[in-house]
Amino acid sequence: MPSPEELAREKIDKLLAECGWIIQNRSTINLSASRGIAIREALLKDRDEVDYLLFVDGKAIGTVEAKPEGFTLTGVEEQSGKYGKGLLDIYPKWREPLPFAYESTGIETQFTNQLDPSPKSRNVFAFHRPETLLEYLEPNANLNTRLTNLLTADQMPTTNLWSAQIEAIRNLEKSLAVNKRRALIQMATGSGKTYTAVNFVYRLIKLVGARRVLFLVDRGNLGDQTLKEFQQFVTPDDGRKFTELYNVQHLQSAQLDRVSRVCISTIQRLYSMLRGEEIDPEIDERSGYELRESLWKQPPPVVYNPNVPIETFDFIITDECHRSIYNLWRQVLEYFDAYLIGLTATPSKQTIGFFNKNLVMEYGHEHAVTDNVNVPYDVYKIDTEITQGGSRVEKGFYVDKRDRLTRKVRWEQLDEDLAYAPNELDRAVVAPDQIRTVIRAFRDRLFTEIFPGRTVVPKTLIFAKDDSHADDIVKIVREEFDKGNDFCQKITYRTTGASPKELIQRFRNSPNPRIAVTVDMIATGTDIKPLEIVMFMRSVKSRSFFEQMKGRGVRVISDTDFQSVTPDAKTKTHFVIVDAVGVCERDKTDSRPLEQRPSVPLEKLMEHIAIGAREPELFSSLAVRLIRLEKRIEPDLRAEVEKLSGGKTLSNIARDLLDAIDPDKIEQHGGSSSRETADFIQKSVAPIATNPDLRNKILAIQRAADQTIDTVSQDKLLFAGADAKTSEAAHDTVRSFRDYIEQHKAEIEALEILYSRPFKKRLTEESLRELEAKLKPQFGPQPVPTLWNAFEKGGTRFPSALIKHKSQTRRFTDLVSLVRVALEREPILQPFEEHVRQRFAAWLEEKRAAGIAFEPDQLTWLEKMRDYISASGSVDREHLEADNVLGPIYKAFGEKLWPLMEELNITLAA
């Protein structure tokens, strides 16, 4: 039986050979046999031996020290360093001491590059190819040295970058300069993470000479967004587009473009590529996070792929990295000998730990709101009886039974009571009136409480439990709003007709749809800037996933772009979470791999095989499911399965899966590591792995169980309104505003004027602008809508019914109305413009009663001055001159113009 050392050398021999090295004994040395030669037990000075001496193009370049599996490698570097200095003089060598040293057990390998400014060992998945080590010897080829010089190589351009992005790039470059190979950037959703990444990728390529950068995304449509970001990026120094200077590949197959400097891929596609397998395009559109949720404790390992050596990428950027560091996906990241840069809005403890606690940038939602990069949010809660407690239907009633597959409905009389809990809703039981009650409460309060004063439904995203639940919601939304198909659309993986990508584009850029219903597809990363309402009709247990879903609403948008899709709004000032399931109140945990899940859905089992998973536990579980399913299907369905599978029944497929993990069968094919066994396993799983039509048919058969439609229970609305935190925050904001007025009434001119009764002097635009600017540090970048929203949410002793003409559109002159109500000078909060119009109408009536009449042209000019006061707080000579109307107004009023203008300023703004 081989010793542990011999077993280790067998594995090392195999790995070296896969990495392009030819193994030779001392007795068979032929340095011209290949570009890369590894000589076993090569002689050194003082009769010493090194386990492997590496030669490239006939000259010694490095060493490999072999140790048995389980041996701690950290203390072996000194021994390797000694070997690198002890070469016999007869050996041709590239330089002395030798620049490269490996220590390996065949399972674990570490590498030291002595050319680094501060050489230290690092773990690598395999050995570098011979030509790569030779490249590392070229002048100025050392990446670590170039990174050290990065901070002095170029001045950071600040054009089109704001302070947090500049800080993130500077901090990352400082980290890279001291050779920290993992770094984490946390920036709030919507704060420009991808744009920041494109900036530093450009700097790494241009200034550091990065050969190739991998940009990993969570799903296919996010790859499209990332590609667009690179295509639109204008380089700050050259002025050309990034893609005019460098090739960018959006990986759509198993073939890497070797000339592209940037490769964009989903992590699941890269995993399949490393395993030498194609991936179903539908799986590429699924979230890697969803695919890994049901992984086994020991996922199928990534093995070395000679077509994709470990040195393929210099840098790997993993977007939404809190989703890609576990089990299956972690293997992909650690396969490459590359610097890892993580991007996330919601880092968990595990994420920070994976990146060695090297959090180079921390920029959360609250900070982003302060910088006007995100908008804040309110929570609006809707509770119903069935949502809270489920329901019971007594026996004897008729209920609908719906086929999950065809959605065909039939009647059935209950022969026993039907009782269901809230967690069974929209799974085993559907209560249409529960959905209708929630949607109706949302509809009835949308324009009075959620977005007061609006007439067009704000862009709304509803999260459903599954595809069937999404269908039910879409149907009821259209009915309750009395709108057509374009108004509300489902956007899920099973959307037919227009592709999900097209529907997302429409939802983002077109007036319709106003409401989109999804399950997970728009949950992360997807950019929908006009979105103002995020509605939860499904629960979420993961804190980071909830934050990502919530983050769909935080993005800012220009007024022009916003109004192009929502015409009755002026500025996006905030978004609203409508919580119909209590998700905001529920305790959530950091997302982790769900290793304790007792059962994994059939769909997930087949998906994992399709992307290359080959774990025995996976095969056996799927085989058992298929055998059970076989017993439930009718002959016509069995025939359809055989037709799709090339003549195999589900039991035949199950037997093939079990054969693929049978030790005797594996031994017959040459053992677990033989090529013949790999082909045998590949053939055994082919019906599942390579046949999406068969997978879909199996799922359709499995879903053919009935779903009960409870048409009897009538739901009742228990509560609809701002949640306690939102109401309390509104009270705090109003209280702070009142305190601010009291503290600064003598310092700020506008407050001094408004505090005095009657006005001692008129308001000016300058004084109101000054007040607005002074409020920003305490009440955010848009203090007027923030304060108005606080009053609307009940943050005053006046009932919200006394907030007149509620509207999302606020001007800086509305500070006048806010101050008056805060001082309790007026019981009604109304836009300043309306206040001015009312005062103007009353003033005209007073003049008429006093016998003063105005000519039609005079009345037109008076209305013009009224509008100046509405817009600026006052009107003066400068306003009239700026608009070239002073002459005609003076002609209409003569010298009476000046006292008349002052009277209007005092009266209308009072």
Image (cartoon, rainbow, N blue to C red):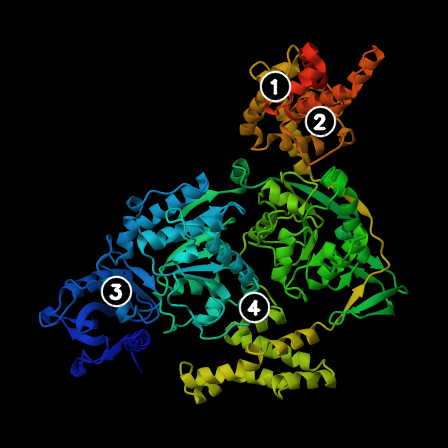
Work out how far the residue at label 4 is from the one at label 1, CA to CA, in angstroms. 61 Å
Q: Which residue is mark 1?
A: 764
Q: Is residue 751 left or right of residue 669?
A: right
Work out how far the residue at label 1 is from the one at label 3, CA to CA, in angstroms. 70 Å
Q: Which numbered dot is residue 135? A: 3
Is label 2 in a helix, a strand or a loop?
helix
Compare marks 4 and 1 and give the one earlier in the sequence: 4
Q: Is residue 141 left or right of residue 615?
A: left
Q: Residues within 10 Å of mark 2 (few under 14, many from 20)?
A: many
Compare marks 4 and 3 and give the one earlier in the sequence: 3
Compare marks 2 and 4 and give the one earlier in the sequence: 4
Is label 4 in a helix, a strand or a loop?
helix
Query: Residue 32 at x, y = what percent?
Result: 19, 79
Q: Residue 567, located in which quarter of the rendered image?
A: top right
Work out how far the residue at label 3 is from the one at label 2, CA to CA, in angstroms. 71 Å
Q: Which residue is mark 4?
A: 283
Is label 1 in a helix, a strand or a loop?
loop
Q: Which residue is mark 2?
A: 833
Residue shown at 53% from the left, 59% from the top? 224
Compare marks 3 and 2 and give the one earlier in the sequence: 3
Compare marks 1 and 3 and give the one earlier in the sequence: 3
In front: label 4 or label 1: 1
